[in-house]
Image (cartoon, rainbow, N blue to C red):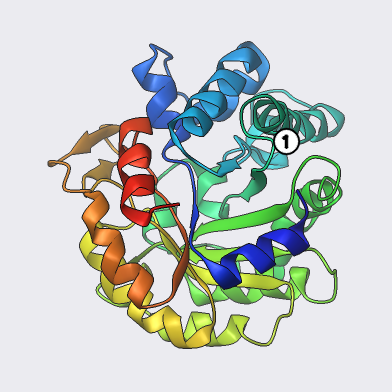
Amino acid sequence: MSPHSLRETIASRPVVLDGGLATLLERHGHDLSSDLWSARLLLDDPAAIEAAHREFFAAGAEVATTASYQVSFEGFGAAGADRDEVETLLRRSVALAAAARDAAAPDGWVAASVGPYGAALADGSEYRGDYDLDVDGLRAFHRPRLDVLASTVGEGADVLAVETIPCLAEVEAVLAELDGTGIPAWLSLSAADGRTRAGEPLEEAFAMAADVAEVLAVGVNCTTPVDARDAVQLAGPHGPVVVYPNSGQSWNAETREWEGRSDFTAQDVDAWVVSGARLVGGCCRVGPEDVTALRTTLGA
């Protein structure tokens, strides 16, 4: 389907996103403990990624988010890949999601994931926002990967999912790179207590995006369901809202383990929709069964 049809659809009803891709891959026995996380399987077992996308579509998801979150020229370069190989992996991530969509949900969409700078660092800084780069440095980091993924829109992907952004400097950087391209994207931050992970006013990030025509929705992901509720209320005045929280558990970057208990429930979505949510799903630790329950709640 087209980005235009996605804009039209979210103007009329909520659209169901998928859940945590890495969560599902781990559930199926894949070791994702390396710095490359689930992106490693783009090299080692791409069929597993396509199968996971199909499973989410079968569960009721209407959008597949690609496995490109952790793919960066810097991250894979440190693992020995050259730039051509990294570009191939970025394109492969879209092709796998598109193949799953075409087979399992022809009316669905593919969102090409653009992860934050912190994902390339693989140290949990996307949940802190304590970066060593300024806006210019962040623009330079994002530009080559955005160029590749943007070229897939209309050729497999339908929209860019700029996600888990933890600070206003990175918001400014990605918006500057998107502005004027004509490539549709959503902008989603990691947040807590109504603020970015770096402690800045969350509403300021949403307001910054309002002037960029390419942004079709703003919101949050990989935050707790409780924090998601407050964030959606802040995002609502700035246009359609995207929201896909994690299960409520927290990631310990030092032990590389999830801590706490899951409190993600599909019933949370009622308040989100009232506040303007139009792209609704789950992030880490949210599986196909949660997506099915969410779709039932939305009546999509």
Viewer-side residue, 64 vs 220: 64
Identify which residue is drawn at 85% across, 69% down.
181
Would you call the spot at circle 1 few (<14 residues within 10 Å), some (14-19), or many (20 or more)?
many
For this orientation, the residue located farthest to the front is: 299
Determine which quarter of the picture holds residue 174: bottom right
Expressed as whole percent of the image width and height from the top left, the position of residue 248 reads 22, 50
Q: Is residue 243 left or right of residue 143?
A: left
Would you say residue 33 is visible in this rendering?
A: no
Expressed as whole percent of the image width and height from the top left, the position of residue 285 reads 31, 37
Viewer-side residue, 136 vs 98: 98
Give the residue at mark 1. 94
Q: How many marks?
A: 1
Residue type (three-letter) at the residue carrying disc 1:
Val
Expressed as whole percent of the image width and height from the top left, the position of residue 85 reads 81, 26
Identify which residue is drawn at 81% across, 29% down.
88
Would you say residue 62 is visible in this rendering?
A: yes
Identify which residue is drawn at 52% across, 85% down.
238
Expressed as whole percent of the image width and height from the top left, the position of residue 180 reads 84, 76
Q: Is residue 172 left or right of residue 242?
A: right
SS at circle 1: helix
